[in-house]
Image: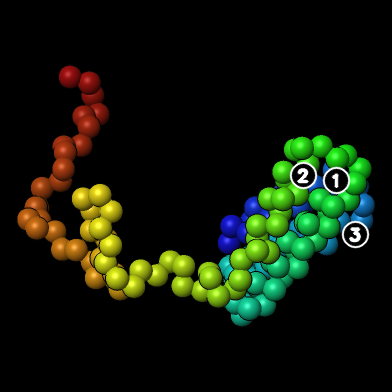
Amino acid sequence: MVSGFLGTLISLERAVALGRPWAYAAPLLTGLGGVGLIVGAPLIAAQWLILAGSLGLVAIFAAIIRRHPALYTFTMGGGSLEPISKSFEEHRDAGELHKSEKIGRVVLPANEESAFPLEPGKEPFHEPAALVPA
């Protein structure tokens, strides 16, 4: 979803800055990939659309760097390589936690094993605010 949303915004902004009609294919492809993720299209189709849009963004930055070779354009161009450097399999179960982990003093349970409250109360944590100041 992040690549679909931010990839669309960044590539659209860069396409407008470049001013070439072919550059608008990149935001179109990443936008279609993001919409595909939202509406439940096959995952692989959405991933391929986002990948194609990301490759289009790399092409946009190549054209921008040819016009204006500066440190910041090289930096942004290098950043556009990040989405295509990841394989599809890396993200397949990125949100899954397969074993419990302890971070600091907090234990994160795995496999949707939710922690039960130790002493549930019937009272709210605080009284509602008064409508008239006291």
Q: Helix or strand or loop: what does disc 1 sit on?
A: helix
Q: What residue did someone put label 2 on?
A: 74
Q: Quadrant of residue 110?
A: bottom left
In the image, is 43 to the left or to the right of 27? left
**What type is the residue that disc 2 sits on?**
Phe
**What type is the residue that disc 3 sits on?**
Trp
Q: Is residue 96 above or below residue 42?
A: above
Q: Is residue 3 above or below residue 126?
A: below
Q: Nearer the viewer, residue 12 or 125?
A: 12
Mark 1 is surrounded, within 10 Å at the Cα level, by few (under 14), some (14 to 19) or many (20 or more) other residues, namely: some
Q: What residue did someone put label 3 on?
A: 22
Q: Quadrant of residue 49?
A: bottom right
Q: Which mark is residue 65?
A: 1
Q: Earlier in the sequence, mark 2 or mark 3?
A: 3
Q: Quadrant of the C terminus?
A: top left
Q: Helix or strand or loop: what does disc 3 sit on?
A: helix
Q: Residue at x 61, y 71 (%)?
A: 87
Query: In 3D space, how far apart are the residues under numbered discs 2 and 3 (Cα atoms)?
Result: 21 Å
Q: Quadrant of the N terminus?
A: bottom right
Query: In 3D space, how far apart are the residues under numbered discs 1 and 3 (Cα atoms)?
Result: 17 Å
